[in-house]
Image (tube, helix red, strand yellow):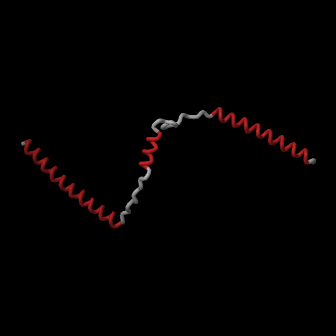
Amino acid sequence: MDVRKIIAEIDAKIASLQQARAVLIGLNEGAVEEKPRRGRPKGSTNAARAAAAAKAAAPRVRRKRRNLSPEGRKRIADAMKRRWEERRKAGSKTARKAAGKKEAAAK
């Protein structure tokens, strides 16, 4: 084959691909409508104030989370169980007193 003929075919193929690309880009731009942006519009008069507020809030540093050892977790769990038990006992005493008062009032 002649080299010139091959180059001409390649150029023709490139031109057709570029045309197809342009058509696809046109379809894509026409089909997708831009949604309105959320938030503060660009060029807002309060932009300087918002930037200053953002700058003031920026240097926040997160504190390192503290880890609880399994022993410490067990101590806390045991203490809570004792507390709940005491509350149950105290609740049953007050319930008995209230029931006694109701019976006395009914007589």
Can you say whether 57 is above or below 43 in the image? below
Q: Residue furthest right?
A: 2
Instruction: State the residue in front, 39 or 25.
Output: 39
Can you say whether 89 is above or below 46 in the image? below
Instruction: State the residue in front, 52 or 14.
Output: 52
On the image, which quarter does residue 89 sit in?
bottom left
Q: Residue furthest left?
A: 107
Image position, residue 37 (x, y; %): 53, 36
Q: Which residue is found at the position 62% from the left and 34% from the top?
A: 32
- Quadrant of the frame with the C terminus: top left
Give the total of numbered labels: 0
Q: Which residue is found at the position 40% from the left and 60% from the top?
A: 64
Tell whether 65 sits left or right of 99.
right
Q: Which residue is found at the position 73% from the left and 37% from the top?
A: 22
Q: Which residue is found at the position 87% from the left and 43% from the top?
A: 8
Tell whether 18 sits left or right of 90.
right
Image position, residue 16 (x, y; %): 79, 38
Tell whether 87 sits left or right of 30.
left
Image position, residue 84 (x, y; %): 24, 56
On the image, which quarter does residue 30 sit in?
top right
Tell whether 3 sits left or right of 100.
right
